[in-house]
Amino acid sequence: MEKNNWFRTYSYIWIGQFISLLSSSAVNFSIMIWLSLTHRSAEILAFAAIAGLLPQAIIGPFAGVYIDRWDRKKVMIFADGFIALCTLGMTFVLKSDGTNMFLIYLLMACRSIGSAFHSPAMQAIAPLLVPEDKLLRVSGINQMLQSVSSIAGPALGTLAISYFPISQVLYLDVIGAAVAITSLFFVTIPHLSRSDMKPSIAAVLEDLKQGMRAIYHNKGLKMLFIYAMVATFCIMPVAIMFPLLTIGHYSGGKWEMSIIEIIWGIGMLIGGSFLGLAKVSVSKVVLVNSMHIVLGITFALSGWFPSTWFIPFVIMTGLGGVSMSILSASFMTIIQEQVPAEMLGRVFSLYFSIAILPSMIGLLFTGFIADVIGVATAFIIAGLIVVLVGLLSFFNSSIMSLGEARKLS
């Protein structure tokens, strides 16, 4: 498969995805500000997160089976279009006088279904276009783009929500999706054609089993997934409560919330730039384990700092962004290196479901955690558990040997 012109091809994809990421970041942050300041409820934020993640986690493994059979370029185009239509529907709901939160949750769930197809397809195209020795750099550049959008998005979102109603701010996401779709028309992505493009239920289940076996029979990958599941169980509720920590514990407002998001994005940009521009000789497994430790420390200290230490909280947030960027890029590259290209759609979808589904339990108790334990205390506990995950990973020989393992066939 010819990969000599991979950078030019990926440049079109990067341009479209950056515009889409920027607009989505602005809209998502606007919604977070609107929910936080309108309701000031951890439960509302948690239910919104569940609506945005649960459908993707449930149908993700089945979506992955079809992603591996269908043209991944078309999957991304139709998924982007469906997400844009759902966002357009939300604009009409939010124009009404009395906001129906059930409809908001429903439309967020529909957006999640589109993401169940788009996100794994996006991750699964890299090995089809990029030489294996460049995969980590591509993951780093992807993190850079996400980071820049994380920096500019909250600022744009805060500015937009300050001058426009939330219903009009949502149009930014529709515009971004249109640009992303247009950019894909200018690229050719290899299609791994199969004879059974319209599989029976039995064939779908068999493909799903193959994806599970690809994980299960690779002991290192299996253990890495288990540790990631434990870490995500703690990270998800904490991530949802970041706005509440900012406006509650540190007595901030919308601009303080925006600063925290921007600093997180700057941190991710630094981490992504490091991977994208430098020749990293350290094992990707070591990077994943180390960044779990660093990320956990930043969470714990953010909850432990006194309420007057907003600047140290900002610093910890930036460091957390660096660690999260390096962790995510390294983790995705490990999967891309360990799993054959024709099975990546299934495996990425399974990973998302395996990691996210248990965290839904934590999200359901977010309101209880915030009211009984306290948001700051929750940050400390979750951070220490994530540190423990990173430490234990170093003592797991199966995980540590992943860098030496070959792809399963």
Image: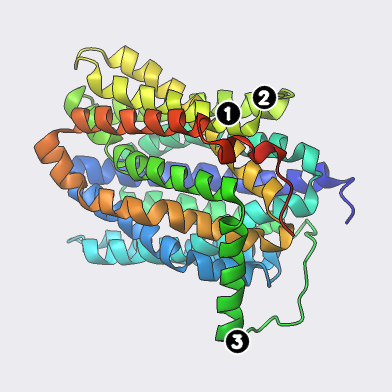
Comparing 16 with 344, the one in front is 344
Rate crowding at label 1 as few (under 14), some (14 to 19) or many (20 or more) other CA atoms within 10 Å. some
What distance separates the C-alpha of mark 1 from that of mark 2?
Answer: 7 Å
Marks 1 and 2, the one that precedes in the sequence? 2
* Residue 313 rendering spot, x and y as whole percentages: 32, 18
Q: What element carries label 2?
A: loop
Q: Nearer the viewer, mark 2 or mark 3?
A: 2
* Residue 204 rendering spot, x and y as whole percentages: 58, 78
Comparing 347 with 27, the one in front is 347
Residue tagged by mark 1?
Answer: 287
Residue tagged by mark 2?
Answer: 282
Q: What element carries label 3?
A: loop
Residue type at tag 2: Val
* Residue 250 rendering spot, x and y as whole percentages: 21, 22
Rate crowding at label 3 as few (under 14), some (14 to 19) or many (20 or more) other CA atoms within 10 Å. few
Q: How many numbered marks, from 0 up?
A: 3
**As displayed, is residue 37 above or below residue 190?**
above
Q: Looking at the image, do the residues carrying marks 1 and 2 touch, with CB atoms under 8 Å apart?
A: yes
Marks 2 and 3, the one that precedes in the sequence? 3
Residue tagged by mark 3?
Answer: 200
Is residue 241 rendered to the left or right of residue 397?
Answer: left
